Amino acid sequence: MLLHLFKNTHIAPLAACLALASPGAAEEIWISNEKDDTLSVIDVATLEVIRTIPTGERPRGITFSKDYSVLYICASDSDTVQVMDPETGEILHELPSGEDPEQFVLHPDDRHLYIANEDDAITTVVDTETRKVVAQIDVGIEPEGMAVSPDGAIAITTSETTNMAHWIDTETQELFANTLVDSRPRHAEFTAGGSELWVSAEIGGTISIFDVATQAEKGKIEFAIDGIHPDRVQPVGFEFTADEKTAFVALGPSNHIAAVNAETYEVEDYILVGRRVWHMDFNSDKSLLFTTNGVSGDVTVVDVANREPIKTIKVGRFPWGAALRP
Amino acid sequence: MGGVLPQTGRALLAALALAAPAAAEIPVPIHYLQLQVEAPPTLSNLDPAPEDLGIAGAEVGLKDNATTGRFMGHNYELTVTQVEPGGDILAAARAALAETTLIVLDAPAETQLQIADLPEAADALLFNASAPDRTLRDADCRGNVLHTAPSDAMRTDALAQFFVKKRWDDLALIAGTNPADISYAADLKASLTKFGLAINSEKTWAFDADMRRNAAQEVPLFTQDLDDHDVLLVADEIKDFARYILYNTWDPRPVAGSEGLTAVTWSPVVEQWGAAQLQSRFEKAADRGMAPKDYAAWAAVRSIGEAVTRTNSGDTATLKAYILGEDFELAGFKGRPMNFRPWNGQLRQPIPIVHPRALVAQAPLEGFLHQRTELDTLGLDQPESQCTAFAN
C-alpha cells in the first residue's frame, strides 16, 4: 500500500516532464564533480541522477564533441584531458594537455581543443585526431575562461591573476590583442553572431562586453542583490538563451543567478539557487537551466520561461562543469 | 571554415604589432628591505623559520606582476636587502630609497617608523609586511606606510567572533612573558571586550622547565586551578610553550590563540577561493608552504602591480592615490576583494581561522555587520583610530 502510494506520487511529475521533453530523446546533463573525481549524469526527463562515472583527478571543464560521440574531461590534477565514451563511461584515451588543465573550448572544426593550463600560464592547443599538441601560447597567470568565436577565427583565454582577456588568432596561434578586465576573470562567451565578447570578473563583480571587431569595451554589467554585500556577488559562468536575448549569470557565493537582458545589458531578475553557483547548461530546447552549486554539492534546475527554480538535485562533491548530451 | 580575421581586426593587429615595441617601457623597481631579528630562544626547535620568509612571497608576487607587465610594457624588478641584527638599517634604507620609492618593509615597528621618518622617504610608498603592532595603525601611523600585514587586533577580533558564534563564552587565558605575548594578550582581551566576552581566569607562563620532557606532569597541575572554561586561550606569539599545552590540560578543552586554533592572514591549509593556485605557485617557487609573512609581502607587491596595471603609470604618487582610492581592489584568494582603509592604510582582508590541518572558519563571520563593509569588524575601526596622517 505504502509502496503503491509512493509510486503514484513519483510517476505524476515524471509523466508531466516527459510530456514537455522532445519525444524519443533521452536527454542528459553531465556534471563534473571536482572533489569526488566523478561525473554525475542527470536524466532531463526525470531530473534524477541515473549514473555516476569515475574520472581522473579533479575533473572540471567538460565538453562533448559535436556529434556527442565522445566527452572531453579536464582532469586537472591528473594533468590530462581524458576522452570518454559516454555510452560505456570508459576512458578511451588521454590527450596531452599541458599541466593542470582547468577549462577548454572545442573549436568549431570539432578537432582542436583550446585548453587553459591554470598552473602554467599557458594555453595549449591540442589536435584531438592526431592527439598532438599543435601550439602552446604564453598567456597571463592562471588562465581559466576559454571561448572561440562562431567562425573559429578567434580564441579567447582569460587569466585570473593577470586580469586580461587574451585574443588568439587561431590561424597563427598567436596573441593579437590583450585587453584588461576587472579582477579575476572566470568565463568568456561570444554572442550576437560573434560580434560581442562577454567576460565575467569574479572579484570585480562585473561582466565586461567587448566589440569583437575593435576589441574595445562597449559596456559593463554590474550586479546588486538586496541583503547581500556586493563583495559576495561574484559573477562566474554564464550562458545565453536560444534567442541570445537573455544571459543567465552564475553569481558564486551570493547563491543567485541573474537574468540579464543581452541587448540593454540590464539585470532583470535574480533567482535563488544552491550555494556557490559556478557553471550551467541548458537542456536542448533551452527550457530548463541546470546550475552547478559547488558548496552545497547539488544542481538547481531552473524553469527558464518562468525564471523559477523547480528542483534541486544532489550530485557529487563540488560540482563544477555542466554539459548537455541530447 | 574560419581562420580569417575580420578586416578591422587585422588592421588593429598590425597597429598593435607596430605600437608594442615603440611604446616606452615603464620601469617599476621594488625594494624588499629586511632587518633580521634575533629569534628569542624557544623550548622546541621543531620549526626553524625559513631563511626566505617574506622574501619568497615578494618574489612570487613579482612573477605575478611580471606576467601582466609583459603584455602591458611594465617592467618590474625586485631587489632584496637583508640587514643583520644590529646592522645599519637606516643606511640600507637610504640606499634603497635612492633607487626606488616603492619599498616593502620587513622589520620591527620602531625600525619602520625610523625609516618612514627619513627625509628621503617623504614621497615614498612603504608597505609594512611584518609588524602587527596596533600603534602603527593608530597614533603612530605614517602617511607613507601602508600595512599588508594584519594587526594583532584583526586576528584577535576574528577569534572573538568565532567564540561568539560558537557560544564559547567561558574563557581562560595563559599568557607568556615575551613583549609580543603581552601585546597579543592585551589585544585578545580588547577583542573579547569588543564582542561582549571576558576572560574569567588567567595565568602567566613564566617557567624555564623543558616541557618536551615533563609537559605531561606540569601542564595538568598548572591548568587545574583555572575556572570552568569552554576554551583555553594561549598568548605565546614567539611559539615557546603553548605547543605543549594541547592535550595536557586538566580539563579536556580546545586550545586557541597562538596555538591550536589560530587566526592568521594566510596558511597552507587555505584552499578555497582559488587559493589552491596561489599555494601551488608558491610551493613550486619556494619549496615550502606559504606563511603569513609571505602572504603580506605578496600582497604588497601585488598591490603595486595592480595599481601600475590600472593606471599605466610607474609614478609613486599616482600609484598611492590609486591604491587608497575607491577603484582599487586586490584579488587576494580569500573570497572577496581587498582594499586599503583610507584612514590608516591598513589592508582590509578576511582572516582565516585555522588549525594545522584545515580551515575552520573565515572572519568576518556571518552575522557580524558593519555599516561600511563587514571587513571593518576586524581591527581598528575609523572612530577608534587616532591616525591622522592620511587626512587631507
Image (cartoon, rainbow, N blue to C red):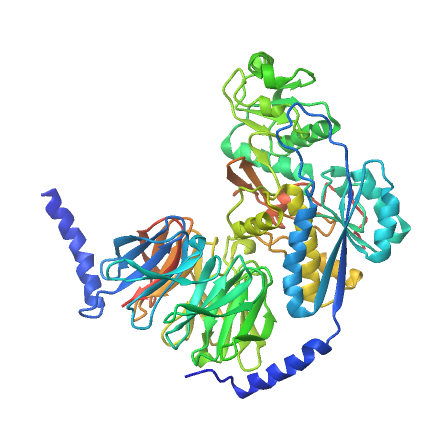
Estimate the x, y position of residue A55 in percent, counting from the top left. 34, 54
Snapshot quadrant of residue A166: bottom right
Residue at (40, 48) in percent of width and height: A35
Estimate the x, y position of residue B17 in percent, counting from the top left. 64, 80
Please indicate whether residue B163 sits to the left or right of residue B348 in the image: left
Location of residue B214 with respect to B274 vertically, above or below = above
Q: Considering depth in this image, is A54 or B120 the residue closer to the camera?
A: A54
Q: Is residue B328 visible?
A: no
Please indicate whether residue B87 sits to the left or right of residue B335 in the image: right
Q: Considering depth in this image, is A133 or B375 the residue closer to the camera?
A: A133
Number of on-image labels: 0
Snapshot quadrant of residue A185: bottom right
Location of residue A249 with respect to A210 vertically, above or below = above
Instruction: Return the residue found at the far left.
Output: A1
Location of residue B341 with respect to B269 vertically, above or below = below
Q: Considering depth in this image, is B376 or A226 the residue closer to the camera?
A: B376
Estimate the x, y position of residue B217 in percent, counting from the top left. 57, 12
Q: Is residue A113 visible?
A: yes
Q: Considering depth in this image, is B163 or A134 the residue closer to the camera?
A: A134
Residue at (51, 52) in percent of width and height: A227
Which quadrant, please, contains the C terminus of chain A? bottom left
Please indicate whether residue B94 sits to the left or right of residue A74 in the image: right
Snapshot quadrant of residue B211: top right
Residue at (45, 56) in percent of width and height: A79
Which quadrant, please, contains the N terminus of chain A? top left
Instruction: Return the residue found at the far right.
Output: B119
